[in-house]
């Protein structure tokens, strides 16, 4: 038979110290933080793709001789 040693007293003590206002605010703020974090990551992805397109466009429009000189260096 397995015996579990559950620290009920410690759990009860920490539960009494929990601030309900702080817990509720954390739950309310977490989705807003997540939205901001995702928006930041999305913007980084869009900016990176846009920059890659611009660099590719400028490379394609450069004369072949200029590209050959850059490749030799």
Image: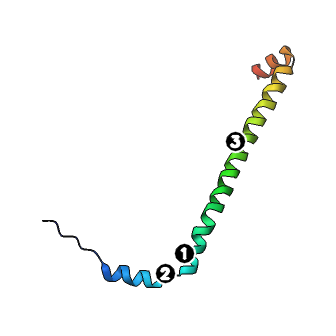
Q: How is the image coloured?
A: rainbow
Q: Nearer the viewer, residue 62 or 19?
A: 19
Mark 2–mark 1 contact, CB under 8 Å?
yes
* 69 w.r.t. 46: above or below: above
Left/right placement of residue 59 relative to residue 16 reads right
Q: CA distance from mark 2 to mark 3?
A: 39 Å
The N terminus lies in quadrant = bottom left
Residue at the spot 22% in from the left edge and 70% down from the top edge: 4
* 40 w.r.t. 20: above or below: above
Give the image location of residue 57, x and y in percent.
82, 25
Q: Work out whether mark 2 precedes mark 3 in sequence or the reverse, and give the earlier one.
A: 2
Mark toward the viewer: 3 or 1: 1
Q: Nearer the viewer, residue 6 or 31?
A: 31
* 34 w.r.t. 3: above or below: above
Mark 2–mark 3 contact, CB under 8 Å?
no
Crowd around label 1: few <14 · some 14–19 · many ≥20 (10 Å): few
Q: Work out whether mark 2 precedes mark 1 in sequence or the reverse, and give the earlier one.
A: 2
Under circle 2, the secondary element is loop
Identify residue for label 3: 45
Q: CA distance from mark 3 to mark 1?
A: 33 Å
Q: CA distance from mark 2 to mark 1?
A: 8 Å
Q: Nearer the viewer, residue 9 or 51?
A: 9
Identify residue for label 2: 18
Q: Which residue appears farthest toward the left when viewing the image?
A: 1
């Amino acid at each position: 038979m397995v015996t579990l040693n559950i620290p009920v007293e410690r759990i009860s003590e920490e539960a009494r110290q929990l601030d309900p206002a702080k817990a509720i605010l954390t739950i309310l703020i977490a989705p807003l933080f997540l939205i901001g974090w995702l928006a930041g990551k999305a913007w980084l992805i869009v900016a990176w793709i846009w920059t890659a397109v611009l660099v590719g466009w400028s490379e394609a429009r450069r004369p072949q001789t200029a590209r050959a000189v850059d490749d030799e260096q």
